[in-house]
Amino acid sequence: MNIAVFSVTENGRQLSQRVSGLLGGEHKVSRYCFHKHTDDDAAVFWNIGSMVGRLFERSDAFIFICACGIAVRAVTPYIGTKADDPAVIVMDDCGRFVIPVLSGHIGGANRLSEVIAERIDATAVITTATDTGGKFSPDSFAVANNLIITDLKAAKDIAAAVLDDEKIGFSSSYSHSGLPEELTEFGICRTGIYIGTDRNAQPFDVTLRLIPRNIVLGIGCKKGTSCEAIMNAAEEVLGRYQLDMRMISKICTIDIKKDEKGLLEFCEKNGCELTVFTAEELMSVSGDFEPSGFVLETTGADNVCERSAVLGSGGKLIIRKNALDGVTVAAAEMPVYLDFERKVL
């Protein structure tokens, strides 16, 4: 996660150092201090709202060490939808309480608050009903298992049904751990969760369809290929197989393409990191791949897209090499196992 930590007082500055140190090993943490109370390791701000606005689109979480009112006013102009908003957490500058105030489930604010509270011996103040009641949360389950929520209204309806002690149906194309008591794979249920790639699946009157984000794209391209060309090729290929672009988990290619501008922009737009392999690593992958003498001569590997997709996924090739406008695209599917005990972070 990209985490921005804001402080406005001297106590807050010291606490921000501590929080940053505790989270920095697992996340990318940046500190922002009010100009009267800062240090050499922090960026300085004079107007907290302006600084938040500059960071909002590229941050996964905000931690404000200040009064709740300051934090709320700082983020309010930039709030969008439940599916897209970053986690927002408020802490008092004495480090006694950690309060998630926005995007508790999907953004991970609840779980991040619990982690911080545990590490600094504070109290996490969780207010979402499913959490306070110790009940199953479809939002948290989806995020923890890297699943795409296709219908926020259905997710809300199911969360409400859980709180009303209504049994929730469950249908999955993938293996999973034991179900929580709120879910059942048997009987007739009004509401339920379907996990798979069938766009028309509607096993329940109210069906929350969750799609695994488990597609690994292997991409090869000519030098100087634009992001737009790569995007068009990827959308065209996935569209043929009725796969959603949001299902992309990882982009893989050969290491000589690690600085290719168009490819890096494509990864950024799709929220994916670029994973690269050497020619030797690609050639070590066993399987039936479409060879190219030209590609072998220029890169040292006889096929970049198919081999990198399989190597990066640890799974099976589901879309073979497709060539469009100087871009080659293949896709592999990572194995999926659904764990109801898995946490968001």
Image (cartoon, helix red, strand yellow):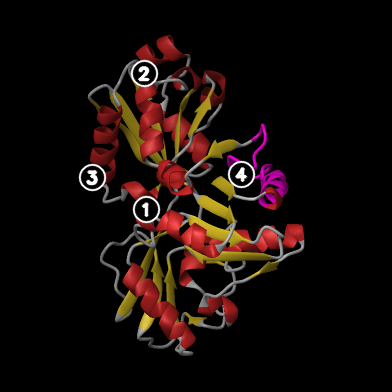
What residue is pinned by disc 2? 292
Question: Residue 113: horizontal and vertical position, in percent?
Answer: 62, 62
Label at residue 240:
3
Query: What residue is at 52 percent from the left and 79 percent from the top?
Result: 129
Up-down relation of residue 196 to residue 283 (above or below): below
Q: Which mark sits nearer the N-terminus, 4 or 2?
A: 4
Q: Which mark sits nearer the N-terminus, 1 or 4?
A: 4
Tell me which amino acid carries mark 4: His
Query: What residue is at 55 percent from the left and 46 percent from the top?
Result: 4
Q: Which quadrant, please, contains the C terminus? A: bottom right
Q: Is residue 270 left or right of residue 234?
A: right
Give the Cα separation between the discs numbered 2 and 3. 24 Å
**Contact (CB < 8 A) between labels 1 and 4?**
no
Q: Which mark sits nearer the N-terminus, 4 or 3?
A: 4
Mark nearer the viewer, 4 or 3: 4
Up-down relation of residue 263 to residue 51 (above or below): above
Tell me which amino acid carries mark 1: Tyr
Q: Is residue 250 visible?
A: yes
Query: What residue is at 56 percent from the left and 25 percent from the top?
Result: 281
**Contact (CB < 8 A) between labels 4 and 2?**
no
Q: Is residue 5 left or right of residue 17?
A: left
What residue is pinned by disc 1? 78
Q: Is residue 288 visible?
A: no
Q: Is residue 257 left or right of residue 35?
A: left
Question: Residue 336: horizontal and vertical position, in percent?
Answer: 50, 56
Closest to the observer, 203 or 102: 102
What residue is pinned by disc 4? 27
